[in-house]
Image: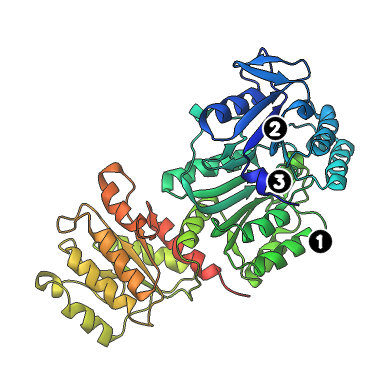
Amino acid sequence: MNFRKLFKPKTMAIVGVSLDNDRHPANVVFNKNQLRYPVEVFAVNPRGGILQGEKVFTHISEIPDKVDLAVIAVRAEHVPDIVAGCADANVGGAAVISGGFAEAGRQDLQDRLAGIAKEAGFPLIGPNCLGIYSPSKVDTFFLPSERMVQPDDGYVALVSQSGGILVDQMVKFAGEGVGLSLAVSIGNKALIRELDLLRYLIKEPNTKVIAFYVEGFEKNEGREFVLAASACPKPVIVLKSGKSAGGSRAVSSHTASLAGDYDVFSEVLSQYGIVEAKSEAELISFCESLSCYQTSIDGKIGIITGSGGHGALSVDICSSYGLSVPTLSEQLQSEIREKLSPSIQAIASIANPLDLTGSAVDDDFVAAADGLSRTPEIDCIIVLLLPYLPGTTSDVGARLSQVSRRAEKPLVAYVPHVEKYRMLIEGFEFNRVPVSPSIEGAVHMAEAMRRCKPC
C-alpha cells in the first residue's frame, strides 16, 4: 500500500459533515483544514446542501477532483459501505474517526470493514481514532484549533493506539520544544498497524526517530514488530501500557487489544536494542535526545555544574539508571584545572561531577566540556546550567554546543525552561543539542542513548 497520499494529501473529503451542527467532529475537521491548511477540502453528506459557502456532495464519487484522503465520521454501521465507495472512487486512503467497532463488542463489523479495505488494497487508519496530524499539511483530529497545542515541524514520528495519549504527548512535546514529522492515532488498527507504519517511516526522510505508544499486539505480531524494529536504521522508542493486570483489562476495553506479557515484551525490547520508555517523561526526553543523536553509548557520564547540590542529585539519578559517573584520572583533572579561570582553580572540584562553583564564567564551562569531550573516560556529557550565575552569558549554550559537535561526543543540558532564559536555550537548540527543564530529564536523555544499542 502507498501511504503517501494519506500523510501528505493535496485533497481531502470529510464524510459525515452536519448541516446544522457546527460542533460535529466532521465539521471541526472540515473547518480547521479549510481555514488553516493547504489541503483542498470537500464536504460529503447524503443530503447535499451548502456548508460554509461550499457545496456539500452527496457521495464521494461526485467530487470532481481526485481525492487523496477521506476522513469518515459517521455511524459505525455505515462505514463499511462508505469505505467501499471510497475504494471504487480511487481515493488514496481513509482515516475512520467513527467508534462503535471491536472496542464496543462489534468485532464482526470491524472485520467486515477490514476485509473490504484489504481486498481493495485501500489504506485505512482506525477506526475509533483521531487519525493524522502532519505538520503544515493536514490535521484530521476532531479537536478545535483553539484547544490544540501543536508541536513545530521536527524529526520525531509518533504513532499511538490512543488518541488521548497522543494529544497529551503533543502538548508536552511542544512545551519541551520537540518537533514532530508526523503523528498518527491508529485506534483499533483494523488494517494499518504499527508494523506497517514502521516500514513506511523507515523510508521517510524527514523522520529520524520513530516512537510508539502500544497497548497490545495480535498473536505473533509483537515478534514481527520487534524484528523489524531491531533492523531499523533509525532509533525506535516504545512506551507500553497494560503492564499490570488492571492496566491490561483497561487496554482490552479501550481498543480491544491483547496486552500480552509485559515483562517478556520488555526483556525482548532490551535484547534487540529497541529503546523502551517506561514513562511519559522518559518518552519525551528519549525522543528529544535521539532526534539529536542517533548514537549509542556505554553510559560513562561526565557532569559539569555550577552547583554541588545539582551535581549530587544528578549522580544519584544516574546511579538509579545504572549510568556510571567515573572519577576522572589525575592527569585529566590536572589538564582541565589548568584551563580554568585563576579565581576558581583552587576551589573547583574536578573529580566528576565537575563543580565549577557559582563563580564560574562561560570560559570555565567551555574548558571543562572541552576536556571531557577529548577523553575516552567519558562517552556523554551532562551540563547542568544555572543561568542565574553572574558569570555566565546567553552565549554559553552555543559555545558548549560547538565543543560537542567538534568532538562528536554527545552533550545534553539542563536549563530551566522559562522565557527569561530563552536565548540561552536557543543556543543549544539551534545547534541540535537537547535541553531538559529538569535534572532527571537530562539524565533520561543520556539513558536513551545507552538503551539504543545494536542487538
Residue 266 in the image, given as x and y percentages of width and height? 66, 63
Going by the numbered disc 2, the residue's amino acid type is Asp
Q: Is there CB contact under 8 Å for labels 2 and 1? A: no
| Residue at 69%, 18% in the rendered image | 18
Q: Is residue 161 visible?
A: no
Residue density around tag 3, few if under 14, some if 14–19, many if 20 or more, within 10 Å: few
Q: What is the C-alpha distance between the residues marked 2 and 1?
A: 41 Å
- The colour mode here is rainbow
Residue 156 in the image, given as x and y percentages of width and height? 53, 53
- According to the image, label 2 marks what residue? 65
Left or right? Give the position of 291 relative to 210: left
The front one of 391 and 232 is 232
Residue density around tag 2, few if under 14, some if 14–19, many if 20 or more, within 10 Å: few
Does residue 198 lie above or below 114 as drawn? below
Q: Earlier in the sequence, mark 1 or mark 3?
A: 1
Left or right? Give the position of 356 relative to 213: left
Going by the numbered disc 1, the residue's amino acid type is Asn
- According to the image, label 1 marks what residue? 220
Mark 3, secondary structure of its residue: helix
Q: What is the C-alpha distance between the residues marked 1 and 3?
A: 23 Å
Residue 21 in the image, given as x and y percentages of width and height? 65, 15
- According to the image, label 3 marks what residue? 246
The front one of 73 and 350 is 73
